[in-house]
Image (spheres, helix red, strand yellow):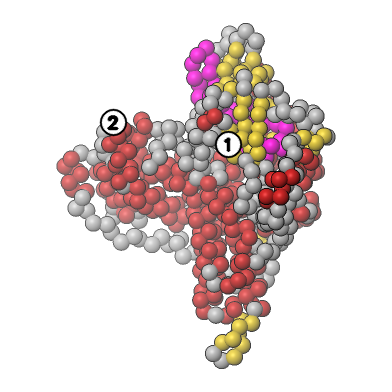
């Protein structure tokens, strides 16, 4: 089992697992688990009375009252993305996003000033179709612009207006080749402060540190890169820097190399890139300086009471997890609504004459269970979004409990969406194989699983945080929780802490983790259900409407010659042999 250097550090791991004495260990091995108590909120599912009438309307949440004209925004936003399904290659898709950015319908600063609108835009896109454009969209507004909003100083935030008016695109360069979605926040790209030139030197020390799978990395002219800041030979950990990747003519800036990741099984309207930096010079104001800066004496200084740490630099991962959770849930629900309309009109032969596919008991049961589970998760996720929106408006960092709740949103929303869509696919025959049904986008749910923090990594963090609570409460304090609503969780946490109590020997620690990996994830799942069951459900501001618009099947393999950046084309040609090799490869 992978141990991450930053999400699960060795120090915090030892602190979380060195909890139980040998005598207590003997006692815990004899403790039996009580029956899980059922939360009063567990069965508070939304009653779906009007299945597949185009939309499911819920009561509006008072705390989610709109500060903008929702009907007007929905109408204008949907009109602006109307042609997105036809933009099937990165050249067309990036141009569609440039147009959306320039329209100003959604401002880069809406994440701070109007977070409900920010999240609603993600949801609206998912009702049209959970394709590559949705990823492109969230990279632009959340990861790129959102990082500047959250980490930048006033002057850096002000430059977003100019970027938006020009329709410029940006990307977010965090993930590295040997630090992928299962490795946590590990950054080996370096950014050294050069006192003599008063510049930063951005560098990729080896291929394993190349930025990897960077969405919109090929078509963007701008970027926010995460690199290890080093001053006078001392590392200050990951920091964010805004930079130019391409000039006004679309040419790569000096010292930057970018490769396209190649053809995927899905979302080929989105470019994904691998990026290297070779001693790239960045000006002093490239470092996003809301929380830290370099003074006139070339010293690292903290500019606020909030220290630069993973929770600070990872703010946009939290908003991204929330947006992804909501998009997956609505995409799954729209797929069910669309499929139910088909099933109601699909005539089959029953024992007593003709009947509809939807009326068959196994199919009806799938729809019933799916709507219950999806709506339960929608109630939970919308409630957690309201809490996150408060932090976004106030410019505060979410507390650890909210951070965990956001992780639960992403883990469970994706898990439920994948499970329910798969169950539906098994019951509707060849319809699930057809293009224009929505089933062709199923792989996008897999993308949701590992984007912005793989579910396994997030579950390990939930487990670690729970064991840290055991250490804080002590064995006696944790045992006192056994007869409460969370008794099963308390016992499981104590038992796992006992099994992982191996001291400072890293080899023994790794073996203990590997030997008990199932218990690690079981504890995380128990924590997830506790969060869901203890949170009063809320609702989204808009009705859920099925607007699915199927994308074209084929895309242009020569798109790189047609990418427009700064008013000109850029890129490398795709050879005729390559096009011939991939000819007929349909991508939904």
Q: Which residue is mark 1?
A: 212
- On screen, residue 227 versus residue 198, left or right, reads left
Residue 350, image x and y in percent? Answer: 56, 87
The answer to whether residue 473 of the structure is visible from this angle is no
Task: Report the number of numbered marks.
Answer: 2
Residue 443, image x and y in percent? Answer: 58, 55
Q: Residues within 10 Å of mark 1 (few under 14, many from 20)?
A: many
- On screen, residue 452 versus residue 67, left or right, reads left
* Occupied quadrant, residue 358: bottom right
Q: Which residue is mark 2?
A: 504
Look at the image and tell me in which quarter the C terminus lies. Answer: bottom right
* Residue at 57%, 80% in the rendered image: 359
* Residue at 64%, 78% in the rendered image: 346
* Residue at 52%, 31% in the rendered image: 208
Q: Nearer the viewer, mark 1 or mark 2?
A: 1
Residue 368, image x and y in percent? Answer: 53, 71
Front residue (pair 379, 264) = 264
* Occupied quadrant, residue 354: bottom right
Mark 1–mark 2 Cα distance, whole angstroms, equals: 33 Å
Residue 103, image x and y in percent? Answer: 80, 43
The secondary structure type at the circle numbered 2 is: loop
* Occupied quadrant, residue 501: top left
Q: Which mark is residue 40?
A: none
Residue 227 belongs to magenta span = yes
**Rendered view: 292 above or below 582:** above
Bounds of the magenta segment: 214-241
- Which numbered disc, 1 or 2, marks the residue that appears first in the sequence? 1
Residue 550 belongs to magenta span = no
């Amino acid at each position: 089992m992978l141990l991450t250097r930053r999400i699960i550090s060795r120090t915090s791991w030892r602190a979380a697992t060195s909890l139980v004495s040998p005598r207590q260990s003997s006692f815990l091995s004899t403790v039996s688990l009580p029956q899980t108590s059922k939360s009063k909120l567990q069965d508070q599912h939304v009653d779906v009375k009007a299945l597949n009438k185009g939309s499911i309307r819920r009561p509006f949440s008072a705390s989610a009252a709109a500060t903008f004209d929702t009907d007007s925004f929905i109408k204008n936003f949907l009109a602006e993305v109307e042609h997105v399904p036809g933009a099937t290659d990165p050249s067309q898709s990036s141009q569609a996003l440039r147009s959306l950015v320039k329209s100003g319908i959604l401002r880069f600063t809406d994440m701070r000033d109007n977070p409900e609108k920010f999240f609603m835009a993600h949801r609206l896109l998912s009702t049209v179709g959970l394709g590559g454009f949705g990823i492109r969209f969230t990279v632009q507004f959340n990861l790129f612009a959102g990082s500047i909003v959250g980490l930048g100083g006033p002057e850096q935030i002000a430059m977003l207006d100019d970027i938006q008016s020009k329709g410029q695109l940006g990307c977010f360069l965090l993930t590295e080749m040997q630090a992928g979605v299962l490795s946590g926040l590990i950054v080996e790209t370096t950014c050294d402060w050069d006192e003599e030139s008063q510049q930063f030197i951005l560098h990729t020390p080896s291929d394993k540190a190349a930025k990897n799978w960077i969405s919109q990395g090929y078509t963007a002219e701008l970027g926010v890169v995460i690199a290890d800041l080093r001053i006078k030979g001392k590392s200050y950990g990951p920091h964010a820097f805004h930079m130019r990747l391409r000039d006004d003519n679309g040419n790569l800036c000096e010292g930057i190399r970018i490769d396209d990741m190649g053809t995927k099984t899905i979302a080929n309207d989105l470019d994904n890139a691998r990026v290297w930096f070779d001693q790239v010079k960045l000006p002093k104001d490239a470092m996003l300086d809301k929380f830290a800066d370099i003074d006139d004496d070339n010293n690292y200084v903290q500019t606020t009471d909030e220290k630069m740490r993973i929770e600070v630099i990872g703010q946009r991962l939290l908003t991204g997890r929330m947006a992804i959770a909501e998009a997956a849930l609505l995409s799954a629900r729209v797929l069910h609504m669309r499929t139910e309309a088909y099933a109601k009109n699909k005539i089959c032969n029953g024992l007593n004459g003709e009947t509809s596919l939807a009326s068959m008991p196994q199919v009806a049961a799938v729809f019933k269970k799916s709507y219950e589970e999806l709506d339960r998760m929608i109630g939970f996720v919308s409630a957690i979004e309201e809490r996150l929106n408060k932090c976004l408006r106030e410019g505060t960092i979410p507390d650890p409990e909210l951070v965990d709740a956001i992780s639960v949103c992403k883990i469970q929303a994706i898990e439920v969406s994948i499970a329910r869509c798969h169950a539906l696919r098994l019951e509707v025959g060849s319809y699930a194989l057809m293009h224009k049904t929505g089933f062709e986008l199923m792989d996008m749910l897999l993308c949701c699983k590992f984007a912005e923090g793989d579910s396994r990594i997030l579950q390990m963090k939930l487990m670690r945080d729970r064991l840290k609570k055991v250490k804080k409460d002590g064995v006696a304090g944790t045992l006192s929780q056994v007869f409460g609503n969370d008794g099963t969780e308390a016992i499981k946490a104590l038992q796992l802490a006992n099994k992982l109590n191996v001291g400072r020997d890293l080899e023994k620690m790794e073996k203990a983790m590997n030997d008990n990996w199932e218990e690690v994830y079981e504890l995380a799942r128990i924590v997830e259900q506790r969060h869901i069951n203890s949170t009063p459900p809320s609702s989204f501001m808009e009705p859920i409407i099925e607007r699915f618009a199927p994308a074209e099947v084929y895309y242009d393999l020569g798109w790189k010659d047609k990418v427009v950046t700064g008013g000109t084309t850029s890129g490398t040609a795709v050879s005729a042999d390559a096009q011939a090799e991939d000819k007929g490869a349909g991508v939904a």
